């Protein structure tokens, strides 16, 4: 009779549904704990990521000044440096060649020969040779 009264009042379905709701709540609690664990993992990974630091970026608008400053702080070759080096090397080689070939003595011999009447017929030719020798920066006396 007790069971009949319970059925008539609907208490048996209420008890069944209450048991199902408790089981469902238990499942939800377990799922929630799993989500919390996942959220903790993600939070830990995000915290490991370095925070954005805007100081790592260029804060100046004039990039040309930064490039010039960089180039002044470092060694680099300019065209004027290369020209100076080539000029000094060439002049050194010319001086070495003059010394090795003993050109000055040969020039002196030619100048001495110029004074002889057989060397050339005109004074104009002698002046031209003297001018060329003087402009070539070869020393003669």
Image: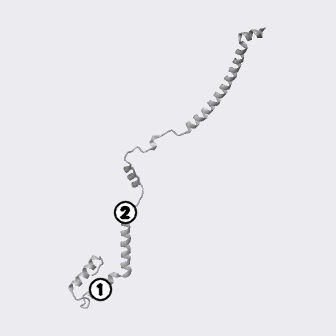
Q: In this view of the protein, which residue sits in the foreground, 104 or 21?
A: 21
In the picture of the structure, the residue carrying the numbered disc 2 is 79
Which comes sooner in the sequence, label 1 or label 2?
2
Lateral position of residue 136 relative to residue 27, left or right: left
- Residue 107: percent from left, percent from top: 31, 83
**Above or below, comparing residue 77 to residue 52 in the picture:** below
Specify the label residue 122 is tagged with. Answer: none
**Above or below, comparing residue 8 to residue 47 in the picture:** above
The quadrant where residue 111 appears? bottom left
In the picture of the structure, the residue carrying the numbered disc 1 is 110
Q: In this view of the protein, which residue sits in the foreground, 79 or 138?
A: 79
The quadrant where residue 80 appears? bottom left
The quadrant where residue 104 appears? bottom left
Q: Residue at x 27, y 76 (%)?
A: 135
- Residue 48: percent from left, percent from top: 56, 38
Q: In this view of the protein, which residue sits in the foreground, 98 or 128?
A: 128
Q: Residue at x 38, y 80 (%)?
A: 100
Q: Residue at x 37, y 72 (%)?
A: 90
Report the residue that reaches farthest toward the left: 123
Lateral position of residue 20 relative to residue 45, left or right: right
Report the residue that reaches farthest toward the right: 1
């Amino acid at each position: 009779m007790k069971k009949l009264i319970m059925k008539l009042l609907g208490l048996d379905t209420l008890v069944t549904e209450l048991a199902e709701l408790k089981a469902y709540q238990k499942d939800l609690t377990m799922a929630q704990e799993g989500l919390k664990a996942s959220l903790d993992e993600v939070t830990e990974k995000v915290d490991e990521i370095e925070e954005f630091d805007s100081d790592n970026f260029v804060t100046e608008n004039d990039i040309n000044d930064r490039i010039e400053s960089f180039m002044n702080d470092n060694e680099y070759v300019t065209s004027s440096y290369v020209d100076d080096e080539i000029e000094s090397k060439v002049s050194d080689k010319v001086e070495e060649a003059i010394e090795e070939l003993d050109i000055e003595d040969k020039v002196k011999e030619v100048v001495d020969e110029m004074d002889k009447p057989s060397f050339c017929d005109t004074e104009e030719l002698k002046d031209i040779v003297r001018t060329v020798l003087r402009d070539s920066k070869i020393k003669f006396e």
